[in-house]
Amino acid sequence: MQKIPVITGNKIVISSLKDYFVDFQQERGAALGIKSNVISCFYPITNRSDTKYSFVPDFEELNKASEYFENQGCEFIGIIHSHNSYKSNSSVNKPSKDDINFYHSFSEANPDFEYLLFPIIGLENNQKVINWYIYINGELKEINMEIAWKRTANRGFFDI
Protein backbone atom coordinates (compact mmCIF):
# COMPACT_ATOMS: atom_id res chain seq x y z
CA MET A 1 0.00 0.00 0.00
CA GLN A 2 1.29 3.43 -0.93
CA LYS A 3 0.56 6.70 0.84
CA ILE A 4 0.18 10.01 -0.98
CA PRO A 5 -0.70 13.37 0.57
CA VAL A 6 -4.38 14.24 0.66
CA ILE A 7 -5.20 16.43 -2.31
CA THR A 8 -7.90 19.03 -1.87
CA GLY A 9 -9.56 21.54 -4.15
CA ASN A 10 -9.78 25.29 -3.85
CA LYS A 11 -13.56 25.84 -3.60
CA ILE A 12 -13.53 28.80 -6.02
CA VAL A 13 -11.48 26.86 -8.59
CA ILE A 14 -13.68 23.76 -8.28
CA SER A 15 -16.80 25.93 -8.63
CA SER A 16 -15.32 27.62 -11.73
CA LEU A 17 -14.37 24.22 -13.09
CA LYS A 18 -17.94 23.00 -12.69
CA ASP A 19 -19.15 26.19 -14.42
CA TYR A 20 -16.81 25.47 -17.35
CA PHE A 21 -18.59 22.17 -17.95
CA VAL A 22 -21.98 23.46 -19.07
CA ASP A 23 -22.80 21.31 -22.09
CA PHE A 24 -23.05 17.60 -21.43
CA GLN A 25 -24.00 16.82 -25.04
CA GLN A 26 -20.31 16.95 -26.09
CA GLU A 27 -17.41 15.75 -23.98
CA ARG A 28 -14.83 18.40 -23.06
CA GLY A 29 -11.85 18.64 -20.76
CA ALA A 30 -9.32 20.69 -18.86
CA ALA A 31 -5.84 20.26 -17.44
CA LEU A 32 -5.56 20.54 -13.65
CA GLY A 33 -2.85 22.40 -11.73
CA ILE A 34 -1.86 21.84 -8.11
CA LYS A 35 -0.07 24.00 -5.56
CA SER A 36 0.76 22.69 -2.06
CA ASN A 37 -1.55 19.67 -2.59
CA VAL A 38 -4.49 21.93 -3.50
CA ILE A 39 -6.02 21.99 -6.98
CA SER A 40 -5.55 25.70 -7.60
CA CYS A 41 -5.96 26.24 -11.34
CA PHE A 42 -7.23 24.67 -14.53
CA TYR A 43 -6.71 25.22 -18.25
CA PRO A 44 -9.44 24.36 -20.84
CA ILE A 45 -8.35 21.81 -23.43
CA THR A 46 -9.92 21.37 -26.85
CA ASN A 47 -11.49 17.99 -27.62
CA ARG A 48 -9.90 16.51 -30.77
CA SER A 49 -12.22 13.50 -30.88
CA ASP A 50 -14.21 12.74 -34.03
CA THR A 51 -17.23 11.92 -31.89
CA LYS A 52 -19.08 13.77 -29.16
CA TYR A 53 -18.99 10.64 -27.02
CA SER A 54 -15.27 10.64 -26.21
CA PHE A 55 -12.54 13.06 -25.18
CA VAL A 56 -9.15 13.25 -26.88
CA PRO A 57 -7.09 16.15 -25.55
CA ASP A 58 -5.19 18.53 -27.81
CA PHE A 59 -1.58 17.80 -26.82
CA GLU A 60 -0.30 21.18 -27.98
CA GLU A 61 -2.76 22.78 -25.57
CA LEU A 62 -1.58 20.46 -22.79
CA ASN A 63 1.91 21.90 -23.31
CA LYS A 64 0.46 25.42 -23.11
CA ALA A 65 -1.34 24.40 -19.90
CA SER A 66 1.98 23.37 -18.35
CA GLU A 67 3.45 26.79 -19.19
CA TYR A 68 0.36 28.52 -17.78
CA PHE A 69 0.56 26.48 -14.58
CA GLU A 70 4.24 27.33 -14.16
CA ASN A 71 3.38 31.05 -14.43
CA GLN A 72 0.67 30.54 -11.78
CA GLY A 73 3.03 28.71 -9.41
CA CYS A 74 1.19 25.43 -10.03
CA GLU A 75 2.23 22.05 -11.35
CA PHE A 76 0.33 19.86 -13.79
CA ILE A 77 -1.47 17.06 -11.89
CA GLY A 78 -3.94 15.60 -14.38
CA ILE A 79 -6.85 15.99 -16.78
CA ILE A 80 -10.54 16.25 -16.00
CA HIS A 81 -13.12 15.54 -18.67
CA SER A 82 -16.87 15.30 -18.91
CA HIS A 83 -18.98 12.39 -19.93
CA ASN A 84 -21.85 12.89 -22.31
CA SER A 85 -25.24 12.93 -20.58
CA TYR A 86 -26.60 10.15 -22.82
CA LYS A 87 -25.10 7.57 -20.45
CA SER A 88 -27.18 6.03 -17.70
CA ASN A 89 -26.80 7.46 -14.19
CA SER A 90 -25.04 4.29 -13.07
CA SER A 91 -22.11 4.77 -15.46
CA VAL A 92 -21.99 8.47 -16.26
CA ASN A 93 -18.95 9.18 -14.09
CA LYS A 94 -17.10 5.89 -14.52
CA PRO A 95 -14.05 5.66 -16.80
CA SER A 96 -14.69 4.00 -20.13
CA LYS A 97 -12.32 1.43 -21.61
CA ASP A 98 -10.96 4.19 -23.90
CA ASP A 99 -10.44 6.44 -20.86
CA ILE A 100 -8.45 3.75 -19.06
CA ASN A 101 -6.33 3.06 -22.17
CA PHE A 102 -5.60 6.79 -22.47
CA TYR A 103 -4.67 7.08 -18.77
CA HIS A 104 -2.27 4.16 -19.12
CA SER A 105 -0.65 5.54 -22.31
CA PHE A 106 -0.42 9.07 -20.94
CA SER A 107 1.15 7.85 -17.69
CA GLU A 108 3.68 5.70 -19.55
CA ALA A 109 4.60 8.67 -21.76
CA ASN A 110 5.07 10.85 -18.64
CA PRO A 111 7.02 8.63 -16.21
CA ASP A 112 8.22 11.56 -14.06
CA PHE A 113 4.82 11.78 -12.37
CA GLU A 114 4.41 9.67 -9.25
CA TYR A 115 0.66 9.79 -9.84
CA LEU A 116 -1.89 11.64 -11.98
CA LEU A 117 -5.50 12.63 -11.40
CA PHE A 118 -8.12 11.80 -14.02
CA PRO A 119 -11.47 12.97 -12.61
CA ILE A 120 -14.69 12.69 -14.59
CA ILE A 121 -17.57 15.15 -14.34
CA GLY A 122 -21.11 14.30 -15.35
CA LEU A 123 -24.73 14.80 -14.49
CA GLU A 124 -26.33 12.70 -11.80
CA ASN A 125 -29.96 13.56 -11.05
CA ASN A 126 -29.42 16.89 -12.87
CA GLN A 127 -26.51 17.81 -10.57
CA LYS A 128 -22.88 18.20 -11.69
CA VAL A 129 -20.87 15.54 -9.89
CA ILE A 130 -17.12 14.92 -10.08
CA ASN A 131 -15.79 11.43 -9.47
CA TRP A 132 -12.07 11.56 -8.69
CA TYR A 133 -9.65 8.93 -9.99
CA ILE A 134 -5.93 8.60 -9.41
CA TYR A 135 -3.61 6.67 -11.71
CA ILE A 136 -0.70 5.26 -9.73
CA ASN A 137 1.59 2.27 -10.24
CA GLY A 138 -0.25 1.28 -13.42
CA GLU A 139 -3.65 1.19 -11.72
CA LEU A 140 -6.67 3.46 -11.69
CA LYS A 141 -8.33 3.93 -8.30
CA GLU A 142 -11.28 6.02 -7.21
CA ILE A 143 -10.61 8.41 -4.32
CA ASN A 144 -13.12 10.19 -2.14
CA MET A 145 -12.37 13.90 -2.42
CA GLU A 146 -15.33 14.80 -0.19
CA ILE A 147 -13.53 13.14 2.71
CA ALA A 148 -10.28 14.82 1.67
CA TRP A 149 -11.88 18.26 1.74
CA LYS A 150 -13.11 17.65 5.27
CA ARG A 151 -9.59 16.58 6.32
CA THR A 152 -7.86 19.69 4.92
CA ALA A 153 -6.97 20.98 8.38
CA ASN A 154 -4.94 17.94 9.38
CA ARG A 155 -3.53 17.14 5.92
CA GLY A 156 -3.64 13.34 6.16
CA PHE A 157 -2.69 10.80 3.54
CA PHE A 158 -4.60 8.68 1.07
CA ASP A 159 -3.83 4.97 1.38
CA ILE A 160 -3.49 3.86 -2.21
Image: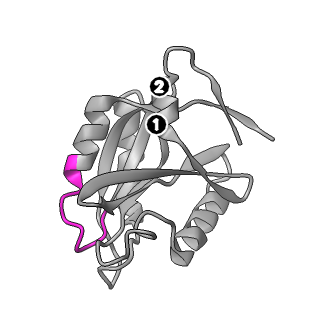
Query: Residue 35: percent from the left, percent from the top?
Result: 45, 27
Quarter of the figure with the C terminus: top right
Which residue ends up furthest to the bottom in the rendered image? 50
The span shown in magenta is 19-28
Using the image as rendered, state which of residue 55 and residue 154 is in the foreground: 154
Q: Nearer the viewer, residue 121 or 81?
A: 121
Q: Is residue 45 above or below residue 18?
A: below
- Asked if labels 1 and 2 touch by Cβ distance under 8 angstroms, the answer is yes
Residue 53: x and y, percent? Answer: 35, 79
Magenta residues, dominant SS class: loop
User: At 24% across and 68% down in the image, what residue appears?
Assistant: 24
The circle on residue 146 is 1
Q: Is 73 located above or below residue 137 in the figure?
A: above
Asked which quadrant contains residue 48, the reply is bottom left
Disc 2: which residue = 150
How far is disc 2 from disc 1 in space, using C-alphas?
7 Å
Which of 97/34 is in front?
A: 97
Residue 79 sits in which quadrant? bottom left
Query: What mark, if any, has residue 57 been given in the picture?
Result: none
Q: Amino acid at mark 2?
A: Lys
Residue 21 falls inside the magenta stretch: yes
Disc 2, SS: helix
> How would you rate the neighbour count of disc 2 (Cα within 10 Å): few for under 14, some for 14-19, many for 20 or more?
few
Q: Amino acid at mark 1?
A: Glu
Rendered residue at 33%/85% (across/down): 50
